[in-house]
Amino acid sequence: MKAMPQNNLPPSVKPSFLGGHFLQFRRSPIGFLTELSKLGDVSFFRMGSQPAYLLNHPDLARDLLVVSAHKFHKGRALERAKKLLGEGLLTNEGESHLQQRRMIQPAFHRERIKSYAAAMTAYAERMANEWRDGDVRDIDKEMMRLTLNIVGKTLFDQNVEDETDEIGNAMTTLVGLFDYLLLPFSEILEKLPIPQARRFNRAKETLDRIIYGFINQRRASGEDKGDLLSMLLHAQDEESGAKMTDKQVRDECLTLFLAGHETTANALTFAFYLLSQNPEKEKKFHEELDALFPNGSVPQPEDYPHLKYTEAVLAEAMRLCPPAWVLGRLATQEHEAGGYKIPKGSLVLVSMYILQRDERFWAEADIFKPERFSPENAVKEANQKFIYFPFGAGVRRCVGEQFAWMEGVLLLATLARKWKLSLIPEQRFGLSPMMTLRPKFGMKMRIEKR
Ligand code: HEM
């Protein structure tokens, strides 16, 4: 018999005297949620006056993201992100989200994505040729530059390199100020003539100018270049026959621009870091590359399916350091989870970071072992069990997932075929869990010829 939902609250940690749970969360999001996760499959805290629940079991994560997804919205963080992203795929809700998703999804089908692979290997090869033996480079910034160029090329078929500084700077400013956008009272802050608000607006105007420029050019030429922009301009919803307005195309471009580069760059940075700390695994990884690319041959898009160990390295890096480390939802109606009542208006969280390191489901959970993902379909199986979901799940699952896998694998292979990356002794390692999970102190690495 199904247990009746309890009226009492799930277990919680003692709120700090000043600032309560909110401050504890802000100070150390991962530490705070990890502490809560030890209390049970459902735990409780308050974000200011808002009740919040952490679900810490694969079945509860599945229920939140798939089975009961219709009872939830994406919450305040994403509501605030509309300020920048408008009604793009990431921020849209309900029927309007589904319609946009139907229009955009074809641009990310497996076959379609193959045509983007050439840009991925070409840009990676260019970077591999720029690096010099003995260089010390900020790998986090290098990966960001690389993935930004690739998303620019695949979105607009444009070598955004010339504009990269402008686009890159504007993007970096926006990403940096995004966290500030999510602060309580930020609705008020942003109206004040404070430097952050001014910088944010300036960066947004720069990106709008560039993106509307691309849209106008393309509409005027009427050309179908086979890139994402052409796909967006021509996309039509089969059910309603609707096409996108310029504003919608702009919102989707900015969304894909933002969602499509930082996460992949972080995944690559963590993968290089973890390889550098695990020489045996690094050796195995290099052996795969040497076997597939003898005599200095360069990885090609068609090599992607053969890069099995490389893919396992990326999968394992995203298990330990998932670039999207937590998902939040807002209950739009009352719900029940693990026997507890979750009132309408509550914030509900699941954390990939925590579940993907959970000893109940992963042996030697904190150890970097790409072999876990070596058997065919291991990623899929872990996905189905809901113990591994770096790309989310359900109707909001990452639309760029296949793109990201292919990009991550091809970039790792192309760069590491030539170069071995080692952490410099002064480089500290830490995690900064903001909107995405980033290396807290950067990632300076020495580049050595292999
Ligand atoms: C390693 C790389 C990536 C990771 C870890 C990642 C992760 C995620 C996650 C977890 C979500 C779901 C968010 C939620 O449910 O609240 C998501 C959504 C999304 N991602 Fe990614 N992503 C990656 C790369 C990409 C790329 C390359 C693109 C596009 C080129 C992209 C575009 C999007 C979009 C548009 C959404 C919103 C989908 C929707 O709500 O319908 N992502 N991503």
Image (spheres, rainbow, N blue to C red):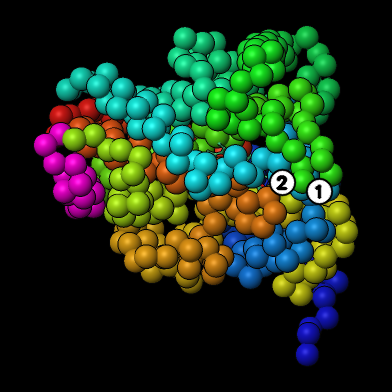
Q: Amino acid at mark 2?
A: Arg
Q: Quadrant of the C terminus?
A: top left
Q: Which mark is residue 91?
A: none
Q: Nearer the viewer, residue 383 or 422?
A: 383
Query: Residue 22 placed where, x, y %?
Result: 71, 43
Q: Are marks 1 and 2 in contact (CB under 8 Å)?
A: yes
Q: Main secondary structure of the magenta part?
A: helix
Relative vertical location of residue 112 with respect to residue 375 in this rendering, above or below: above
Q: Is residue 237 left or right of residue 119?
A: right
Relative vertical location of residue 30 with respect to residue 151 in this rendering, above or below: below
Residue at x-position 55% and y-position 29%: 227
The magenta span reads 280-296
Q: Amino acid at mark 1?
A: Glu
**Is residue 59 visible in the rendered structure shown here?**
yes
Residue at x-position 73% and y-position 66%: 67
Residue that mark 2 sits on: 102
293 part of magenta stretch: yes
Residue that mark 1 sits on: 239
